[in-house]
Image (tube, rainbow, N blue to C red):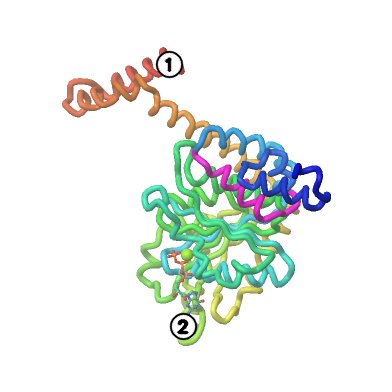
Amino acid sequence: MAIDQHPESIQKNIRFQKRRNLEPTIDELYQGVIQGNRSYLARAITMAESNSEQHFQKAQSLLQKLLPNTGKSIRIGITGVPGAGKSTFIEAFGMHLCNQGFRVAVLAIDPSSSISGGSILGDKTRMEQLSKHPLAFIRPSPTAGKLGGVHRKTREAMLICEAAGYDVILIETVGVGQSEVLIRDMVDFFMLLVLTGAGDELQGMKKGIMELADAVIVHKADGANKLKAEKTRQEYNRILHFLQPATKGWETKAYTCSSLTNEGIGELWQMIQSFEEAGKASGVFEARRKMQAREWLYSIIADQLHYQFYHHPQVKAELPKLENQVIAGEMTVASAANALFRLFMEHKQ
Ligand SMILES: Nc1nc2c(ncn2[C@@H]2O[C@H](COP(=O)(O)OP(=O)(O)OP(=O)(O)O)[C@@H](O)[C@H]2O)c(=O)[nH]1
Ligand SMILES: [Mg+2]
């Protein structure tokens, strides 16, 4: 039977079935995302995360269309050493927000994902309730690829979630060096989760990381650990007092909370709301977003240049020889680099 001989509702279904395996158009993705359809949201993010050139172009057209619908959420970054309880905290904090009617998107940045090939973060087992909540959307870390690393992809996923109407974006990243700086550049509010009994650790903790934070959370402040947590909080406050605050006009302080008992979770959300209000009133909030967009542009240019250079056929062919000459002390570093750049410029692709 021809499709137009069926009643209209069935026709629709058949068309849907037929197209189910086809890739949605940019317009379908756009409509789906702004209507908050989770399946389209997930497909749009998958497209932005894809390493295929064709998907990259399509995702860019989609993002361009979505851009006016982005920017309305509060973007919160959460870092801390492995086991600090980041995922458990996101579960408790996210549930607190969802129960107040906020829509919460959870993204993860796993800088090692290009090596391990999978995500160790954003684990749904630690976010059992949240992953089932209709107001929450959880997305594991993308893997790095040739068209930019995990940071570009996470940034774009964040914009797509905003266009889909999510009010709060939580980004989890494991605290191991460089990733904190990169995540700081994409969020409005950045929190560092720490543990108690960190006396020595406190001394050795990199000042740089604490200077990126808008709040230091002494986590797992429950049971026998509660008193210790309070002491640790005071120690952190003493140190923070001497450090440069991350956000102009905002004093970075230490707080305690427990994701098991939920104690302190509500207060943290109130504190973040005060941060947003104060920053919006003073203009600091908007100024940071503008600076982040500007820096993002330069980082994408740098990524692209890096990629183009190292994938340039002549450069690829010559690089090992020149590298050997440099190592053998037969050629200076600068002249080897110059020779490669000449090849890159002369043989434009
Ligand atoms: N007592 C107590 N334990 C907690 C709390 N939050 C997390 N934990 C425990 O700490 C352990 C680590 O928690 P995760 O949430 O997986 O920690 P994480 O920082 O996300 O770890 P990675 O993703 O591996 O970096 C788990 O065994 C949790 O049950 C808390 O508030 N109190
Ligand atoms: Mg985790």
Q: Within the image, what quadrant is residue 307 found in?
A: top left
**Spot occupied by residue 309 in the image (x, y as percentages of width and height):** 41, 26
| Front-lying residue, 21 or 208 | 21
Residue drawn 50% across and 66% down? 86
Overall secondary structure of the magenta section:
helix
Query: In this view of the protein, can residue 238 be seen by the observer?
Result: no
Binning the other alpha carbons within 10 Å of mark 1 as few (below 14), some (14 to 19) or many (20 upward) gives few
Vertical side of 49 occupied by 263: above or below: below
Q: Position of residue 241 (x, y in %)?
A: 52, 64
Q: Is residue 320 visible?
A: yes
| Residue at x-position 56% and y-position 47% | 46
- As measured in the structure, the alpha-carbon distance from the residue carrying label 2 to the one carrying label 1 is 61 Å
Q: Residue at x 56, y 54 (%)?
A: 246
| Magenta stretch bounds | 34-51
Magenta span includes 314: no
Instruction: For ligand 1, tell me if the residue under mark 2 lies within 8 Å.
Output: yes
For the point 52% across and 51% down, the residue is 183
Image mark count: 2
Of circles 2 and 1, the one toward us is 1
Looking at the rendered structure, the secondary structure element under dot 2 is helix
Q: Nearer the viewer, residue 339 or 11?
A: 11
Identify residue type, mark 2: Asn
Q: Where is residue 313, by image quadrant?
A: top left
Q: Position of residue 263 (x, y in %)?
A: 60, 79
Residue 122 at x, y percent in the picture: 51, 61
On the rendered structure, is 325 left or right of 246? left
Name the residue beneath numbered marker 2.
225
The residue carrying mark 1 is 345
Which residue type carries mark 1? Met
Question: Circle 1 — which element?
Answer: helix
Indicate the quadrant containing the N terminus: top left, top right, bottom left or bottom right.
top right
Q: Name the side, left or right, on which 248 lies relative to 342.
A: right
